[in-house]
Amino acid sequence: MARHVSRRETLAGVGIAALSAGCLDRTRNIAGRDRSSQLTLEINAPPADRDPNAIRIARHLAENLNAVGIDARINTLGLTDLRRKVLINHNFDVYVGQFREAEPFDPDAMYAFTHSQFVAESGWQNPFGFTDINGTDELLASQRRTGGDERREAVEDLQRTLCELQPFTVVAFPDPLTAVREDRFENWTNRQPLSVGGLLGVERVDAGDGDADGTGTESGDGTAAGETTAGDNETTAGDDETTAGDNETTTSDNETTANGLIGDNPFTDSGDEEGDSATLRLVTTDERITQNWNPIAAEYRRYGTFTSLLYDRLALVEDGEIIPWLAAGWERVGDSGIEVSLRDVDWHDGEPVTAEDVAFTYEFLQDTSMGTTESPVPTPTFRGRVSAVDEATAVDEMTVRLTLDGVNDAVGVRALQVPILPKHIWEERTDVATIAGFEVDAETTEAVVTNNEDPIGSGPVRFVEASPEESVAFERNPDHFLVRADDGDDSTGGGDGSTGDEGDPLAGIPERFRGKPAFDRLEIEVMGSDIAAVQAVGDGFADATVSNLGPDAVPRIGREADARLVTGRSGGFYHVGYNTRRAPLSNPRFRGVLASLIDKRSLVDIAFDGYAEAAASPLAAAPEWVPSDLQWGDGETDPVHPFVGEPGSLDAETARDRLREAGYRFDEEGRLIAPGA
Amino acid sequence: MSLLLSVVSSLALWVGSSLLVASVAIIRPRRLYGLWNDLRDRLWEIRKPLAALVVVLIASAIGRSSLQTVSELFGLQLTWAIYALEGNFVAWLQSTFGSPQLTMYFSSVYVYGYVFLLAFPFLAYLALPRTTTVKRLLVAYALNYAIGLVLYTVVFAYGPRNVMPDMVTSLLFTHNPEFMALTGEVNEPTNVFPSLHTSLSVTVGTFAVLTRREYPLWTPLAAWLAASVVIATMYLGIHWLTDVIGGTALALGAVSLSYRLVDEE
């Protein structure tokens, strides 16, 4: 990014004088050198309307960079453009963003994020171009293969190495704040409201009387759920006869389902706004879910919560609890194999989910071209997870065997958490992506770039309609195993013989998810800003916010009578990412000084209104992994790269001294001179 | 959505009644009566510039989202340049003059005053015996929109409230989030340079000065409103000073072009 006056211009200016003076050689020696100029760094961040926290971090960093003589420029970009620039094109200096895990995560999440084997790939794998072959790479590999104390040691060393080398600077773990109103839906979790578990755990208040009784006495709940789902199943049968798959028929069918359901249900006869009462209305400032439903698209997914509701994974991990999801169960076979048995479920278009689909998914995510291009085109997300699986083969219709790459159990469970895709749809998307028939980039397949309109998954909700940048609607999938098996359990489900022999078809599924989701329809509307989103909840136009709330929006929740603040623990840490392909960001010493320009303590107060935890380690959300020397504790400052200055005020002179020590130079006006590119 | 509907109906009510009052006070009943009798002929006379404006507005409504995409992909990302140029001017403006009363005033001017400011001259100039001025006004509006749309596409930049939320409060939406439902329908947050609020207001203000003989009462009112809208764009944290200067230049250019394109009858 450093700008230089071109050599030609300089030469033209001094050419005549040089010739007449007759010292051409000396002139060449001087003019042949690139002229030094001030170092410029571009900081990319989303605008305040989209993410009120990130831009504040960017502003803080830019201000301090300017104070030490670096020309920092903030470039605001929409969420999709920002991701494309950083994750796909790697065309950035510095960015401010959030990690893609919604909940506290296993240390192996760092594998794809920082391992040098992924530098050439686009997506969520090593966007920094960071290479530390003997340190980070080895520790990442070792924590995958070892267990117990050996793994713990590797993970601790890994964190120390990452903290020292700073391919990215962890700023803080934000509290996942959500404004909710509880007059229609209740039981908002205090772990992570915006997660698959959080949204499935929500209960309807309308059916409140029934449910309140039901939670006390099992049978009461059972009958209530049984009755409603029985109604569901009737229409489902009709649905199957007319071979669903056509989206229109599915939609209209379900409208009748909703009406029938309300007519049948004795608990909803209160008479208020009929069909609307079963709709969970969410508001967000993130418009991407209204445009794209591709579970592997790196530009469009934040945490992937809604695509996880569309596409089931083999396992669901909630608050450390491993729940067999699409898989009814699994067992380790031999040294490196897992044999997974599937639940009996259908895709949203009526086709059955088979072991073949699962095997396809793992192969496909390794190479979305399925071997048709010169070099593989791997998935831009879930790359670390699928890299743990060497091979996936269907043993029979309902059993799939995964051969793991010698990884431990924790990493094996992570490998079970990828969206399972229907083979009959995604095998059509293995061609190189084209625009109007022209290949633009042989490194991209249709699967990676498709918006995946009318997504067909197997999840508890299915797609209904969307109007881009405005809203999207999903509906409850009445065929999902959470609903169907719960029904079969009570009313001796007709024709469900296959699941009967296992005893409880919902084995392993916690009570709070059975018969869920509690809503018939899920609507997400895009709002202009976090403040507008909170206001919509306060005014009763929405039930909950699902995007980040800034320091101006949070106090507003308290002022709205019906709105309440729900929060939990997040894994989506805010960080400042550096493009280590570019000098001087390639120098870990330089990055270390940049890290010490970030006053994390003050940022937590300013940018997050206190609703965040400052941190040094990317694993700080899972404190059991963090060694004591990296814990933030009650300390005011970072244990590895302490802020230069007092909280709230930078000591620019000391920061310059650090940069001088690292070998950087300043001109007479105090500007840092860009080292020759 | 009902929120949008309530904002729109309140806007229609307020602007409608202000237009009524202003028409009687400024245009005077006699001219209004003449306008009523001659309405069809006059509309027929101005059909070409009116059609041009309608075409530009429709094109803008349809093409906006695709042009937005073009802007995202190929536009000049100039947020940093604008900030480097003017620094914290908008933040200074807010911190120096900010008060709840002024916020209230500028918010209503930005939404209600602006719509009135654009609508009234059309009526007033249509009521004039000759249609030259109303034609020029329509041409100037069309030019503002058309050139503005091109510049929006070329320049990809966010406004101060999106770039420096630590210093510039998004006053309009913080105090009246319901307005966001309305402006969100007609504005992309990346369409900041130039400020069309500024350019159209200055256009109206310039016409008001040029037609001061016909409507001496309108000139000071229009000047006051136009100046208020211009300041409001910055006070509310929506636009940069650079956008306002760009908008003013666009307005003056559009007015002078409209005089060249539409000759005196």
Image (cartoon, grey):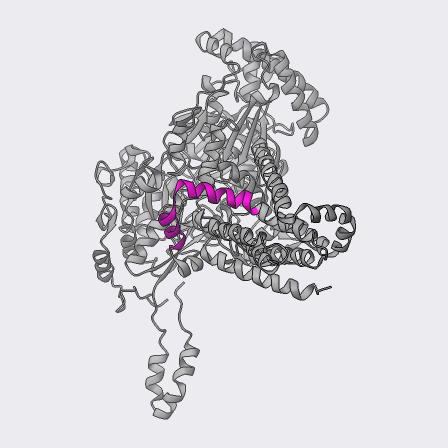
Nearest the eye: A301 or A71? A71
**How many numbered discs sit on the rendered protein?**
0
Q: Position of residue B124 (x, y in %)?
A: 65, 51
Location of the C terminus of chain B (image quadrant): bottom right
A385 over B252 or under it: above or below = above
Please tell me whether residue B92 belongs to the stretch shown in magenta: yes
Q: Main secondary structure of the magenta part?
A: helix
* Extent of the magenta region: B88-114
Q: Position of residue B72 (x, y in %)?
A: 54, 53
B6 over A653 or under it: above or below = above
Q: Residue at x 29, y 40 (%)?
A: A615
Q: Position of residue A358 (x, y in %)?
A: 54, 33
Q: Residue at x 47, y 43 (%)?
A: B105
In this rendering, does residue A523 appear at all? yes
Nearest the eye: A97 or A177? A177
Q: Is residue B88 left or right of residue B183?
A: left
Q: Position of residue A495 (x, y in %)?
A: 64, 15
Residue at far front of view: B30
Nearest the eye: A619 or B73? B73
Q: Residue at x 66, y 16 (%)?
A: A234
Please tell me whether residue A185 belongs to the stretch shown in magenta: no
